[in-house]
Image (cartoon, grey):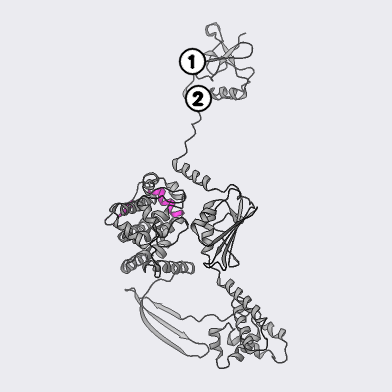
Amino acid sequence: MPNKCGVVNCKGNYNSAHKCRVFRLPKNVLDQQKWLNVLPPREGFVIDPSKFFICEKHWPAETQMIKISGGSTRPVSPPSIFDVPLSRLPTPKPAPRQPKVEDQQLNFFLQKDKIKSFTEFQPDKELTKMYENIVISRTVDKFVCIFMENDFCASYLTIIVHNKSTLCSPLTFCAFKNGVSVPLGKILSPNNGLQYYSQFMEAVHSARNYSIPVDVAVKRITLSLQKVLDLEDPDSCKTKKLTFLTRQLHLTYDKNFSVNDYCFAVESYPQCSYSQLRDVLTLPSKRKIQSVISSTDIDQSSEENMEKPWKGVKPKAKRYKQTTLQFGQSSRAGAVSTSTSDSDTGSSSRVTRRVVARKPAGGRESFFKRLGDKDTENYRLGYPGQKDNLRLNANLRFYKGEISSYPDGAFIDEIHNDWWGHYQLLERHHGYIQWIFPIREEGMNWQAQALQQHEAKAIVADKDAHNRVMMSYEMMLDFYGMKLEDRRTGQIARSRQWKERYENLNYSSHNYLRITRILKSLGEFELEHLKKPFLVFILSEIFQHGQLKRTLNSLQNYWIGTIKSDADREELHSTIEEQT
């Protein structure tokens, strides 16, 4: 009997009327699977490749044939003609998608920035270009960079890169400033790992600006004084007083008091009352002194027994003035009653004055508010004491289109033309924002220059450069889901993609720092009139439409503070208080 076609609804070779040629499945596994993938499914039927045949009716007439073993031929391509509904045919796999342009640019930037091995790690040129008075040394497994003082008499920062790989990094990084280890966990990879060149330069920049904590500095001063005292005469009056002051420094971070601290303080300063001593010295409370002295025989007890009652005694807490706010029902102005009392003298005084009442913030919120007030006040005052460096002009040249941004950036016109609307690139690339919105402060991009006053004046005077600043503002508004309707008034409305962009702004909090920079930069380029409409629009989205609620804290603590008009700042704060 002739072999019959096994395809669904096909009668090939079932009788003489449908006699035709049939082909076996290819012996090659890959080719065989290609044929099986295009066949219509047949429920409850398992195909045996050695006994399954397909007739020639399932190929076009001009199909190319190939010779196989035994001298026979078979089609090169899989079958393609079937007498079944299209819905029963297998769905072909879609062609692979081409990567987006911004993804290609981002991948190129990451590949170029990645550190592959210790031998290829060569940051010498960049370091000597950016910093002066540095000494660079390299061994088989270490890269050392020492930052020296101007006279090369002493060093203040040491950078060490070890050829020691971690779980996800080829190198490890550590820095020591004046002998103190610099914590860089937020910049480096786990276990102080180093993966990228930009990560290395950012870590160096942060280490140079690192300030040693007060308690660490006090400990080092105490140890230095102690070494000096070991060489002096222990019975001299000068040595005793220095010993007492050294002990006071020690008590600022170690609260392990002893009776000797009290006795020596009273003996050294007999003309001062104990309450006066507590204002300038670290000593326990007077009540604690009296209770311990009454229960301890100082003359007969040993020094060891005298120290025991003082274990764990806490220093005197600061006496803050107790303030009570009395809010009126019809006016925001209220009376503040301040009462101050002294537990040692028993005297008290009361003063009443009129102030503008505000709702007190919580601990964490008040901390960020104080931090934001200090930052924005320095901006509003024009950065007192900061000088204009006429030799620096990178921002002016960038906005004139003469140089590109760094690292892995582009010219200003290319950013406006090619990056506008590429939201993923604008979100992940962290080096361009310091170029398109420069301010008179150092940023996280060490290759960007702080704005100079003469640069800001020159950009404002150049119509093309000033127009580019406005286009940068409009590009970032589009990135945040907004659009500028009127350049003259600064009026803002939602863009078409506002839902997607609002969601990104709500959960990508690093954009709040970008907005603070944008608002400061607008003020430097005489675009102060754009700030208030932007903040009014954000407030309307928060309180009227229930959108962008996560931005409220940054708006209160930082963004409003960038407005230079006292009346406008007070108006915005009043609006928030009325709504909350």
Q: Which residue lies furthest to the left in this view?
A: 488
Asked whether 382 or 483 is in front, the reply is: 382
Vertical order, 252 against 20 (above or below): below
**Front label number (2 vs 1):** 1
Vertical order, 251 against 107 (above or below): below
Give the number of callouts. Answer: 2
The residue that label 1 is drawn on is 60
Asked whether 407 or 521 is in front, the reply is: 407
Q: Helix, strand or loop at disc 1?
A: loop
What amino acid is found at the position of numbered circle 1 in the picture?
Pro
For residue 535, say whether it is visible: no
Local packing at callout 2 (Cα closer than 10 Å; few below 14, some 14-19, many 20+) is: few
Q: Does the magenta stretch include residue 144?
A: no
Compared across the picture, whether 251 is left or right of 89 comes to right
What amino acid is found at the position of numbered circle 2 in the picture?
Arg
Please state, as top left, top right, bottom left or bottom right, where the C terminus lies in the image: bottom left
Counting from the top left corner in percent of width and height, residue 374 is at 43, 69
Q: Helix, strand or loop at disc 2?
A: helix
Counting from the top left corner in percent of width and height, residue 533 is at 31, 59
Q: Which stretch did the figure color magenta?
A: 488-509
Residue drawn at point x = 61 percent, y = 52 percent: 171
Residue drawn at point x = 63 percent, y = 14 percent: 69
Please state, as top left, top right, bottom left or bottom right, where the N terminus lies in the image: top right
The residue that label 2 is drawn on is 88
Q: Which residue lies furthest to the top in this view?
A: 16
Asked whether 393 or 552 is in front, the reply is: 393
Counting from the top left corner in percent of width and height, residue 419 is at 40, 46
**Contact, mark 2 vs mark 1 (Cβ under 8 Å):** no
Compared across the picture, whether 205 is left or right of 376 comes to right
